[in-house]
């Protein structure tokens, strides 16, 4: 029986030692002996067998590399310790050790239970461990059947579970838990090393860096196709450290792709696998389990800094960064005003020609819904006509501007927005869309991300650029359409009657013109008020918010100078910005003078910003612009969107009235007089909507101004200091802010002054 008991403890089922009345020894044992035998056979032997079988299955079939390593450690370390304890007890019994062998060579069951004291709790914990790895959340699902679907356990869950178990209060359990934590974290650290040292994805289903669904390997999209899955990030990895790990692996992919290309071999980038590997490996080797968050962040930060200083700055020079950011500022943020005017004019021309063609074929397309939508070819032709217009404005001698325009033509695209792009923007936009104002279909002006620009420019940044562009362009479009209404000479002036007209006709013509002029007086006042409002709003957004944000970001991008050089650099930027603003009227543009000194600056810089810091600062730069132009204010953007629709309706009615009046004066038919009356009725209703909309918008601006003066509604504290300071506490980037809403206060003062100077500006404005 003793031999069978030892075999049972070793994980071999024994038909002799069985629970219940079927046991051959059932009638020979007392109840206390039954309880002791159950403790040995069931609580120890059966659990040992169960743990070994489940751990073996996990080590062979589990999708997680870390979980397989933990299961293998359970077998090779913890169960091996239990097996060694069984052999020690057997050896002591064979040597007649008095601890176990009593008189007449009798081995009491109580002595056997005492020999394995503590292992009952250990095996129970190991059983819970393998059960958790096999079916995480099983206990929650037993209590709540709707808890969630069964999924494979991840490395992060295993590490978190083992760390929690180390604080249960039992020393032996804490020791075992720390051993499991060490195995799991070292296995996970090997995955991290494969990614941050070589740029190779370690595989497995539980590494937190994964490829996006549906994306294939591509040199141009390799950087953007990897993302961080938050639920797979271990508890000791901070979000910023996870972002750095993602950045390191993707950067190494870029470097390897550059080295593999014969065309781009002139970059002569040192191979990180050979030149930087020993130093980077030393940082990771210094980590000991349990890994602390501070030590791990410090190691990853040191690797990031080393890679940036030795390889990435040659892969992504500052001059190239400044060029693409300047391009985005000029065209996506409408720094070049002539681009916005040319784009709006080209879109209006395409719609006018389309409406004329559809009017000719009205019967043919009466029931054709396809005729109401815009096509891809038409969208592309709008952008092509815009580039042609801008090219005609440039001087043949201005090579730098021609090169900038050629690069913009290569990188900037105008496309019809798809369903996926619409859904991806909902998280970033205010929930109000402005992209369907330029053309009937929602269009997207975006920047094509090319390697190595995607080291700091991501799809979310381009989406935010597109949202801001659509918003600013809609404001510029509304102002332009309102301003062009003054060109409707038939409505603005009283033309003399035809020479051959009789006296009665001449009298009717003069009477109708006078009546029309009186009726349109309030409408023209509303048009003037709306144009003034959009003009001041555009001037604040473009002239102060975008320009000041860009100046702040541009200054941070440049390498450090001496105090005298910094003053000269600020003067260069100010002069270049003034020249850019004054050149809009003459359809010319020049880049900031500081960009012409970039090569000298790079040579003199002791250390530039690494791409990850640049990406974070650039994101803060865009978010500060988005906040300052009120794009994240749902109430204001909703009002503004409705106001733009009302303005479009008012402009369309005035243009229609101009056509009707011209035809009426030329033919004198009564049908045009009746049509004019119907249009005037609609105009009065539309004028009321526009006037009321401006009043509500100004009231909302006042509330926003009051809120920001009180300290609420400002830029998020997360954007307050972003930069290299995350690593070494210096050189942090602070985005530009409007300073407690003083910019809005100036806009409101201008609107108030305009209203007092001209009572026509806004009836019941205040």
Image: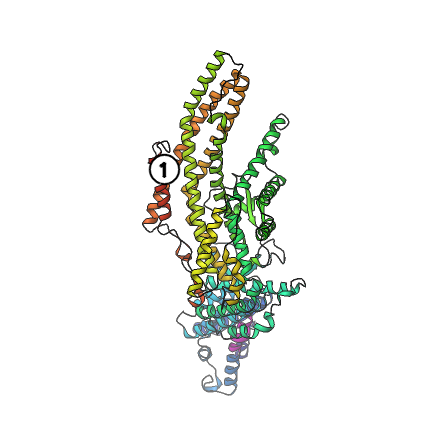
Specify the segment rendered in magenta. Answer: 71-83
In percent of the image, x 44 and y 78: which residue is there?
A: 114
Give the quarter of the image for residue 517.
top left
Task: Give the colour scheme of this rendering.
Answer: rainbow
Depicted 761 relative to depicted 319: above or below: above
Report the front residue among 253 and 124. Answer: 253
Label 1 packing within 10 angstroms: few (<14), some (14-19), many (20+): some
Position of residue 258 in the picture relative to residue 553 (left or right): right
Q: Position of residue 722 (x, y in %)?
A: 44, 60
Give the quarter of the image for residue 261.
bottom right
Report the front residue among 225 and 733. Answer: 733
In percent of the image, x 39 and y 39: which residue is there?
A: 697
Q: Position of residue 151 (x, y in %)?
A: 53, 58
Q: Main secondary structure of the magenta part?
A: helix
Position of residue 443 in the picture relative to residue 538 (left or right): right
Identify the image quadrant of the C terminus: top left
Depicted 738 relative to depicted 153: above or below: above
**Per the image, is 187 magenta?**
no
Report the front residue among 197 and 662. Answer: 662
Position of residue 330 in the picture relative to residue 172 (left or right): right
Q: Position of residue 713 (x, y in %)?
A: 37, 50
Depicted 28 relative to depicted 153: above or below: below
> Can residue 371 be seen at all in this image of the molecule?
yes
Q: Position of residue 736 (x, y in %)?
A: 41, 54
Q: How many numbered circles are shown? A: 1
**Per the image, is 74 magenta?**
yes
Report the front residue among 227 and 616. Answer: 616
The secondary structure type at the circle numbered 1 is helix
Residue pointed to by mark 1: 754
């Amino acid at each position: 029986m003793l031999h069978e008991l030892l075999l049972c403890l070793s994980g071999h089922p024994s038909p002799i030692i069985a629970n219940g009345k079927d046991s051959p020894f059932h009638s020979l044992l007392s109840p206390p002996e039954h309880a002791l035998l159950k403790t040995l056979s069931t609580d120890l032997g059966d659990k040992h067998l169960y743990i070994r079988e489940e751990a073996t299955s996990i080590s062979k079939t589990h999708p997680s590399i870390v979980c397989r390593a933990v299961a293998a450690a359970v077998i090779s370390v913890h169960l091996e310790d239990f097996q060694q304890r069984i052999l020690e007890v057997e050896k002591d019994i064979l040597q007649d050790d008095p601890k176990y062998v009593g008189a007449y060579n009798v081995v009491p069951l109580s002595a056997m239970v005492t020999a394995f004291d503590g292992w009952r709790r250990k095996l129970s914990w190991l059983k819970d461990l393998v059960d958790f790895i096999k079916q995480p959340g099983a206990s929650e699902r037993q209590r709540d059947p709707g808890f969630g679907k069964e999924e494979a356990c991840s490395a992060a869950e295993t590490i978190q579970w083992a760390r929690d178990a180390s604080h249960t209060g039992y020393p032996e359990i804490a020791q075992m838990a720390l051993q499991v934590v060490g195995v799991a974290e070292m296995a996970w650290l090997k995955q991290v090393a494969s990614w941050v040292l070589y740029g190779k994805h370690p595989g497995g289903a539980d590494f937190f860096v994964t490829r996006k669904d549906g994306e294939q390997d591509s040199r141009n999209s390799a950087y953007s196709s990897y993302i961080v899955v938050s639920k797979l990030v271990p508890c000791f990895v901070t979000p910023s450290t996870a972002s750095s790990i993602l950045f390191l692996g993707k950067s190494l992919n870029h470097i390897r792709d550059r080295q593999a290309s014969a065309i781009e071999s002139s970059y002569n980038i040192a191979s990180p696998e050979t030149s930087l590997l020993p130093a980077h490996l030393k940082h990771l080797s210094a980590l000991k389990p349990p890994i602390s968050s501070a030590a791990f962040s410090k190691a990853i930060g040191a690797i990031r800094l080393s890679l940036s200083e030795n390889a990435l700055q040659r892969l992504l020079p500052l001059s190239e960064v400044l060029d693409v950011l300047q391009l985005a500022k000029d065209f996506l943020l409408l720094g070049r005003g002539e681009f916005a005017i040319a784009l709006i004019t080209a879109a209006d021309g395409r719609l006018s020609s389309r409406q004329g063609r559809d009017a000719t074929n009205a019967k043919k397309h009466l029931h054709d819904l396809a005729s109401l939508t815009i096509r891809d070819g038409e969208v592309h032709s709008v952008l092509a006509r815009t580039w042609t217009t801008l090219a005609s404005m440039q001087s043949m001698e201005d090579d730098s501007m021609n090169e900038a325009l050629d690069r913009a033509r290569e990188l900037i695209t105008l496309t019809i927005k798809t369903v996926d792009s619409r859904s991806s923007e909902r998280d970033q936009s205010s929930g109000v869309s402005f992209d369907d104002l330029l053309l009937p279909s929602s269009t997207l002006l975006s920047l094509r991300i090319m390697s190595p620009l995607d080291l700091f420019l991501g799809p979310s940044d381009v989406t935010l650029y597109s949202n801001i562009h659509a918003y600013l362009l809609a404001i510029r479009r509304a102002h332009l359409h309102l301003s062009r209404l003054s060109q409707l000479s038939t409505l603005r002036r009283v033309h003399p009657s035809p020479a051959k007209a009789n006296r009665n006709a001449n009298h009717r013509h003069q009477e109708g013109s006078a009546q029309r002029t009186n009726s349109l007086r309030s409408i023209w006042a509303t048009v003037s008020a709306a144009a003034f409002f959009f003009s001041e709003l555009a001037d604040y957004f473009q002239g102060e918010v975008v320009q000041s944000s860009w100046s702040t970001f541009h200054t941070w991008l440049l390498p450090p100078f001496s105090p005298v050089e910094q003053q000269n650099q600020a003067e260069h930027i100010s002069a270049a910005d003034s020249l850019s603003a004054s050149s809009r009227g003459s359809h010319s543009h020049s880049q900031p003078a500081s960009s012409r000194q970039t090569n000298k600056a790079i040579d003199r810089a002791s250390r530039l910003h690494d791409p990850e810091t640049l990406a974070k600062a650039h994101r803060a730069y865009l978010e500060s612009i988005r906040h300052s132009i009120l794009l994240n204010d749902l109430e204001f953007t909703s009002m503004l969107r409705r106001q733009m629709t009302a303005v479009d309706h008012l402009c369309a009615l005035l243009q229609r009235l101009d056509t009707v009046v011209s035809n009426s004066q030329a033919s004198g038919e009564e049908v045009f007089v009746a049509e004019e009356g119907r249009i005037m009725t609609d105009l009065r209703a539309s004028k009321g909507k526009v006037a009321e909309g401006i009043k509500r918008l100004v009231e909302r601006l006042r509330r926003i101004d009051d809120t920001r003066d009180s300290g609420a509604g400002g830029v998020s504290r997360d954007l307050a200091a972003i930069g290299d300071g995350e690593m070494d506490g210096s050189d942090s980037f602070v985005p530009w802010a409007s300073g407690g809403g003083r910019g809005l206060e100036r806009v409101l003062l201008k609107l108030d002054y305009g209203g007092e100077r001209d009572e026509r500006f806004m009836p019941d404005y205040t």
